[in-house]
Amino acid sequence: MFANLKNYWQQLPDFSLSHILLRIPLAVVFIEQGLSKFPFDPAMGSALGINALVWWFVCYGEVAAGVGLLVGGLATLPRIKDIHIVAIAGDMLTRFSGIVMCCIITGVIWTVIKPESLITFILTDYMHFSLWAGGLYFALRGNWAVAVYKK
């Protein structure tokens, strides 16, 4: 029975670009949210109780994290991932973009949403939770799942 199961799993196709199905929508949401804050206006941030410097990092960080996630994903394409330095740079860019996403969404959760509890937040605000979880996934996993075969 176990031999049949092992054979079954080996026959399944390897879709190594499946991360694109998560990467593109997450990047588009971040880019769209960032672009909606332009032109940069410190008054928008002060209305939320955020100083101008932090608001600047939020505005540009959302766009940069989304673009970084897409550009980092280019390093996973079949012929590009074989160039070792490009694969490493793409992995670092993907991880950094994920960290920036987590930081921005954590700030949104703490300053704007202010949930009563973690359970309430997870059950009622799936959008921000999903954005945070997606950023955390790319921060922790990077491109190494598909870009370089580790030995």
Image (tube, rainbow, N blue to C red):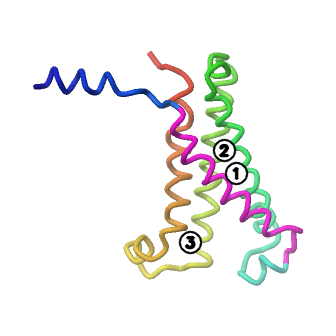
Kind of residue sitting beneath label 3 = Ile
Q: Position of residue 102 (x, y in %)?
A: 58, 57
Residue identified by numbered label 3: 109
Q: Reply above or below: 36 against 136.
A: below
Kind of residue sitting beneath label 1 = Gly
Instruction: Please tell me the numbered disc located at residue 66.
Output: 1
Kind of residue sitting beneath label 2 = Leu
Give the SS element for disc 3.
helix
Residue identified by numbered label 2: 69
Instruction: Please tell me the numbered disc located at residue 102.
Output: none
The quadrant the N terminus occupies is: top left
Residue at 69% x, 24% y is 86
Q: Is residue 112 magenta?
A: no
As rendered, which of 123 and 41 lies closer to the eye?
123
Label 1 crowd (10 A; few <14 / some 14-19 / many >=20): many
Q: Residue furthest left?
A: 1
The quadrant the C terminus occupies is: top left
Q: Earlier in the sequence, mark 1 or mark 3?
A: 1
Residue at 72% x, 65% y is 33
Give the SS element for disc 1.
helix
Q: Is residue 37 magenta?
A: yes
